[in-house]
Amino acid sequence: MTFCMTDELKEKFQVLAIERTSPFCYGCYKVVGNVGDDSGLCTGCGSDDLMRHLDGVGVEYGSEWVIENLIDEESESINQDDIYDDMLDDCYESVKIGTLEYSVSHVLKCVDQVAYDIGKHEYFDSLVEDGVYIELNGEYYVPDIE
């Protein structure tokens, strides 16, 4: 599991993860509170070592797995090539070769695929730092969180 986002977005997702999950005691093997409850103690055995339970998904310690599920299930994945191509074509004039004219993105992809890929990754890394997108396992998503 690898996701990158701004600290502000991460805090919002952590709050949402608590709101969408219930505390779960592995010792008693049962849900010990209501959805959104973060009381911290099992009502059966008194344990404070509680997991989080997400209906239809399962249980696990921490909230990162819940955040990953929320992003994957509820956010829109984007087509990186299309967005990067649009940026390149908007920023630079088309390339003329003889009497033919080509978009910059097309020429860069054909001439130097490695430079194209590096530029695309750097571009999306900067957009993640700016909070425009979230990266999860190499895919980029629009952060649909209010």
Image: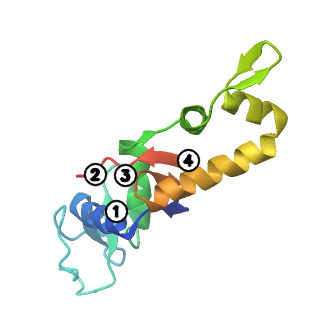
Instruction: Specify the amino acid type for callout 3.
Output: Leu
According to the picture, the residue beneath numbered tag 3 turns out to be 70
**What's the amino acid at mark 4?**
Glu
Rounded to the nearest angstrom, the CA distance separating label 1 from label 2 is 8 Å
- Circle nearer the N terminus (2, 4): 4
Which percent across, then down, holds residue 116? 72, 43
Q: Position of residue 72 (x, y in %)?
A: 44, 47
Task: Indicate the amino acid at tag 2.
Answer: Ile
Mark 1 surroundings within 10 Å by alpha-carbon count, few (fewer than 14), some (14 through 19), many (20 or more): some
Q: Residue at x 67, y 32 (%)?
A: 105
Q: Which residue is mark 4?
A: 139
The quadrant in which the N terminus is found is bottom right
* 146 lies left or right of 92: left
Q: Secondary structure at mark 1?
A: helix
Q: Mark 4 packing: few (<14 Cα in 10 Å), some, or many (20+)?
A: some
Q: Label 3 crowding class (10 Å Cα cut-off): few <14, some 14-19, many 20+?
A: some
